[in-house]
Image (cartoon, rainbow, N blue to C red):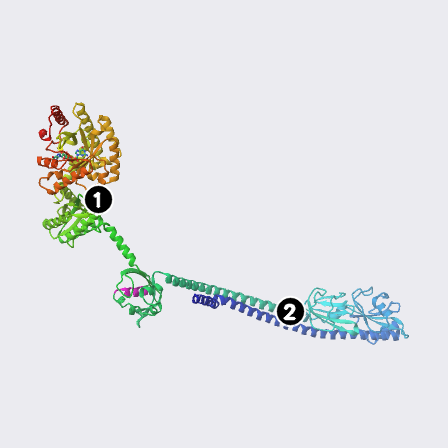
Amino acid sequence: MEAHGGHDDFGGSARWRRMALETYVTLPLFTLVLLGAIWTATLHFIDAELDAAHNVAGDSLVELSDTYEAQVVRNLQGIDQTLKVLKYAVEKKGAAGALPELQQNDLLPPGLVFIVSIADASGRIVASNPATESISVANEEYFLYHQQRRTSSTYIAQAMRDQANKDWHLHFTRRVNTPEGEFAGVVVVEVDPGYFTSGYERARLGEKGVLGLVGSDGVARVLRVGELVSWGQKIAAMPDKGTTVPQALPGSWDGVRRYTALRPLPRYQLSVLVGLSEDEQMAPAFGKRRERLLEAGAASVAVLLVAALAWFWTWQGARARRHIRRAQETYAAASEANMDAFFVLRAIRGADGAITDFKIATANSRAEQMSGHSKQALQGQSLCNWLPQVRHNGIFKRLVRIATEGGVHQEEWENTMPQLNAGWIHAQVVGVEGGAVMIVRDITERKAAEHRIFHMALHDALTGLPNRSLIGDRLQQAIAEAQRDHNAVHVAFIDLDGFKLVNDGLGHTAGDLLLKEVAGRMAACLRRHDTVGRFGGDEFVLVLPQQKNDMAPTASLLERVREAVIGPVVLDEQEVRVSCSIGVAMYPRDGEDPDTLLMNADAAMYRAKETGKNNVQFYTQEMNSSLEEKLALLDGLRKALDDNQLYVEYQPKADLSSGLLFGVEALVRWRHPERGMIRPDIFIPLAEECGMIGAIGDWVLQQACHQARAWQAAGLPPITVSVNVSPRQFDDLRLVARVVEALNASGLAAGLLELEVTESLIMRDVGQAVAKMRELEAKGVALSIDDFGTGYSSLSSLKRFPISRLKIDKSFVRDLDTSADDRAIARAIISLAHELDVRVIAEGVETVQQRDFLQANGCDEMQGYLLSRPVAPQEIAVLLARQREAAERGQLLTADTQAPIA
Ligand SMILES: Nc1nc2c(ncn2[C@@H]2O[C@@H]3COP(=O)(O)O[C@H]4[C@@H](O)[C@H](n5cnc6c(=O)[nH]c(N)nc65)O[C@@H]4COP(=O)(O)O[C@H]3[C@H]2O)c(=O)[nH]1
């Protein structure tokens, strides 16, 4: 178990390892790593490029700031210089003389750009260049600044305009003092704010770059963005004044993010502002970044696509491999558990590529059992070394063909290779790459079962002899051979005589034993090429192929058969004898096909029966005509009742001790309009066969009852009348009712009616027979057993029958004079009857000797030609009348004296 568990763990980890190695698992991981690398590199490059762009922007900013600062400082210095000169001149020459003096000395800046003006202490502009309207600037911010402060520095006011100059200007002002140092006014240089941004280089600053001056109060003195020059804005978030490190200003006045440098110019309370739009500066970098992102994106998509395709492909492959592996595992497990032996064979090829042998690659447990070798021993084993027979019995050839051409081949064979432990083998060979798989099943049991079933289908279960179907085949075969070789086939149809008596009397088990014994005896008489089969019931058929159509050998063979059958058989400690009636038909004389031959042999057998049984008859055409005759008789019998062709004769029965007639037996007669008299033992079995016996029997019963009553009515002494009851009549459920009806209809006393049933009839089913007989007994009707001694009644069953009489069969009476056996039987029956306390009557008594013997041995009654043949009722009346008269005379009319009447 542990080893098993360990194997499982091993199997589990191996599975995981295998999983990990599967491309469809590693491929996504690899793809992720690749994507990570692509994006890390891309972002890194973007970062570096953005950094570089930042730096370039920073450098540009510094450079621009430097340039602009120098330019502004230069401009401011110029303006400051002008202010200083102006201030000096005003303080020296006074406000009115200063400008002309300076103009004269060309010390004034160009009037197109700069407006120079001088305000006196009251704030009135007293001189200006170019000359302007004299206005008061007393309330202007710069004027108030200088008026209130004794500073000599230059003040730069915010951009403004006044009445004199309608355009916006930046005002640069200085205080003018009196010689005593009191406030004497202000000198002003006005300049267009745009003057300070004229150095705006579009190429370097772009459309959104900014250049400007910002006062220490945070208010822009001038700003230029592209073409737009403006001023007065409050710069919300001032950058760190001490640094020129470029940074994008968040939320500058116009919302544009810029790298901004603010350089303070302490002397002028101004800062130089230079700004580079982040968008513009970074545009190439951003563009590059977009490009790089697009490239990385495209590369990622490409990688993903390729990876997805590759993954799908490998996944499909893995799935297929997994399926194959599972199938292999399942196959291995199934083959292991299978009842079939598996051999996976790898082809071994010679130099020319032809298969020279097979090597066993795998085998399962069943293969171990079947071969007696372990799997390890089998594996690697050469097939032809192990089973050299395969080279000669065709198996190797077939294996090579299947291994080469593929496909599946199945076959079954009776195994002759001792290396394989199986009687019969079913092999399925499947061609596979590089060899073949051989699945071997031991079908010995199935074959045996098939054989049994096959045998059962064609043989009789009881005797083991061929059955009807196989007899037909054998006969057909024999006919075909005889036809080919111009030979003959004789078919003998055998029916046992008296078998029914044994079967009915001693029971079916005894009957079966008898059949087996007889079958064995018949078979023992036959030659090797003859066939004996059981045709059904007690019928057997012999198929006897003959060299020529000579009856003699067949006749002597059948004679041996007849004699073998007739030998005594001991059943249930009782010795019984049966004979057989044999009919023979010959091919080609009597028929050319099995059916005709069998039918004709059957007809011949019937003839054997008719001619006293226990003999052999060869078929003649006349036999079939008797069959036709039988059919014609049957037809006539149907009309016989209606056309009054039937009548009843009565045979007297006499008491042996008194010689007095005490009863009669009613015997039916048929006078056929064309054929004349027909014997009852011919037409009664026919009536039995076709079911007419019911109507005929009923009619006889009614006739007999009426007749008996008629004799009585005629004043004759009452006698019993006995009526024969055949098996079919006895089985009729309404038998008792019919008897009662007949009695009632005739008015005959039940005690005067006797029914004769045969021994074999009541022995068929003793229980049922006893019940029926008791019913009849209850109605007062007497019963006697007819033909006693021909059956095999046991004493115990006889005791149960409510009978009043046993009738010794005439076959025992006939030979009483000559046969000691029959005498012994007659004696035995008489003593048996007396033991049972019933009367015994002998029938068929024809001679005085017979009568004397019977009388001497205690037989009670007799019937037979010695007394009288069956006669018309009138003759019985005469007899009875005679007997009555004799009695009246005090004489005894004995059997001797009254016979022969008929
Ligand atoms: N050799 C010889 N024969 C003698 C002598 N005495 C009488 N017989 C014959 O023996 C037969 C006795 O009748 P069974 O054994 O019942 O045998 C009867 C009986 O089995 C049957 N049978 C006749 N009539 C009827 C009937 O009405 N109903 C039924 N079910 N069967 C009947 O037909 C059988 C033959 O009847 P039968 O030909 O009338 O033949 C009668 C009778 O004529 C004799 O001394 N010597």
Toward which corner of the image does residue 619 lie, by quadrant? top left
Q: Position of residue 781 (x, y in %)?
A: 23, 31
Question: For this view, does 87 lie left or right of residue 684?
Answer: right
Camera-side residue: 645 or 668? 668
Q: Position of residue 25 (x, y in %)?
A: 49, 66
Q: Position of residue 608 (x, y in %)?
A: 13, 43
What residue is pinned by disc 1? 506
Observer-side mark, 1 or 2, equals 1
Q: Residue furthest bottom?
A: 105
Camera-side residue: 405 or 659? 659
Question: For this view, does 821 lie left or right of residue 451?
Answer: left
Q: Which residues are magenta?
A: 393-404
The three-letter amino acid code for the residue at tag 2 is Met
Quarter holding the N terminus is bottom left
- Of the four image quadrants, the one with ligand 1 is top left
Task: Tell me the residue at 72%/73% (across/down).
Answer: 243
Task: Tell me the residue at 19%/28% (across/down).
Answer: 703
Question: For this view, does 19 lie left or right of residue 709?
Answer: right
Q: Is residue 301 magenta?
A: no
Nearer-N-terminus badge (1/2)? 2
Do labels 1 and 2 touch, CB within 8 Å? no
Quarter holding the C terminus is top left
For the residue labelled by badge 2, is the local secondary structure a helix, a strand or a loop?
helix
For the residue labelled by badge 1, is the local secondary structure a helix, a strand or a loop?
helix
Task: Tell me the residue at 13%/41% (across/down).
Answer: 824
Q: Position of residue 30 (x, y in %)?
A: 51, 68
The mark found on residue 282 in the picture is 2
Q: Is residue 594 visible?
A: no
The three-letter amino acid code for the residue at tag 1 is Leu
